[in-house]
Amino acid sequence: MSKSVEAHRPACSRHPLSASAILALAGVLSVFVPSVLAAPVRQISVQVSVVTVPVTVTNARGDFVGSLERNDFRLWVDDAEQPIEYFASEEEPAQVLVLVETGPAVYLLRREHIAAAGALLAGLGADDRVAVAGYSEKPQLLLDFTANKQQAASSLNGLNYGLGIAGLNFYDSLASVVDWVESGSAGGKRAIVVLTTGLDSSGAGPWQHLLDRLQTSNVLVLPVGLGGDLRTSDARVTRPGGKLSKGPAQIGEEMSFAESSRALEAIAQETGGRVFYPRSPRDFEDAYRRIASLVRHQYSLGFTAPAADGRYHAIRVEVLSDRSRVAAGKARAPAYRVNARRGFLAPGTAP
């Protein structure tokens, strides 16, 4: 551990002070002491290589599984089991940013997924705080974090959707929003609910930047995949200026829903979230209710990083059932679904 403040003990004089010296010293202290007391106190900083892993556990119906204890979990880093040094079952206020794609691809879908978003706001606690942002070519914060759910609903209903030719920079937009959530929220549980087709016209560079950013973040990302029946077909969307088409992909010209679905799955897995693909108003309401529960309820596991090598290390979390068999992991078909981030970036060695 390193401390940024050192204590120095002054040497003591053995010679008594004269009366004039005492008076002179008193005069100096009368000026010096108040200025010292008014100065800001520098906090001691301590470096501790403890990694915290937020975990959600759901059953086959998608409902949160409560009442689990430390001994119900197993945690692995790079296929080596690690002792769980910290455990908590947490239900605490959350900071939730709702990010909505506002490009032309979702204009006709806006009514059903925005109308159903009321189920998300209704499922959050009174002390949960919500922010709203939209994106097409770049993200725009429309409402900062507030506990006023009616204000959040008004912001969602007031979204403006672009109808012209525009790029979809989903990856860069999400990376920027992760920065907003981490820098602007007051700690605690933090999540991004992103309503998106997952389509992106920017190329490979922003995708890698997003993955790198997610690996150093502790923000839960819960994508809601828009597009309905198009997601289950071989439909492709051309880059700005084209039309919806089907058929083999032309590299650098088309974006497929299959590719966007894989991207959404990777984003969710990296952060310990999950993806929802609603196709009807009832599906949207059900998805938002489950998201509200996942945001508010979670377990927190902590362990000491096995190495300070500045490298990325894979994480795997398993849950044991009442019969002590593996319920999520490699052993058998899972009784529970465990959502935990896939890895972490270890701290580097001190210079």
Image: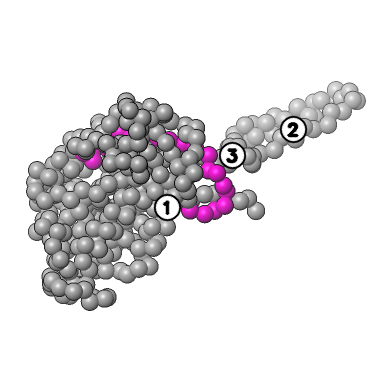
Label 1, on which residue? 215
Give the quarter of the image for residue 335: top left
> Callout 2: helix, strand or loop?
helix
Q: In screen coordinates, is 249 left or right of 228? A: right
- What is the quadrant of the N terminus in the image? top right
Q: Mark 3 or mark 2: which comes first in sequence? A: 2
- Residue extending farthest right: 15
Dot 1 and dot 3 residues touching (CB under 8 Å): no
| Magenta highlight on residue 234 | no
Give the residue type at disc 2.
Val
For the point 75% across and 35% down, which residue is it? Answer: 8
The residue carrying pointer 3 sits among few (fewer than 14), some (14 to 19) or many (20 or more) residues within 10 Å by Cα, namely: few
Cα–Cα gap, marks 3 and 2: 35 Å
Residue 118 seen by the camera: no
Give the residue type at disc 3.
Val
Label 2, on which residue? 28
In front of the other: 93 or 289: 289
Residue 78 at x, y percent in the picture: 47, 48
Cα–Cα gap, marks 1 and 3: 23 Å
In front of the other: 192 or 12: 192
The magenta span reads 290-312
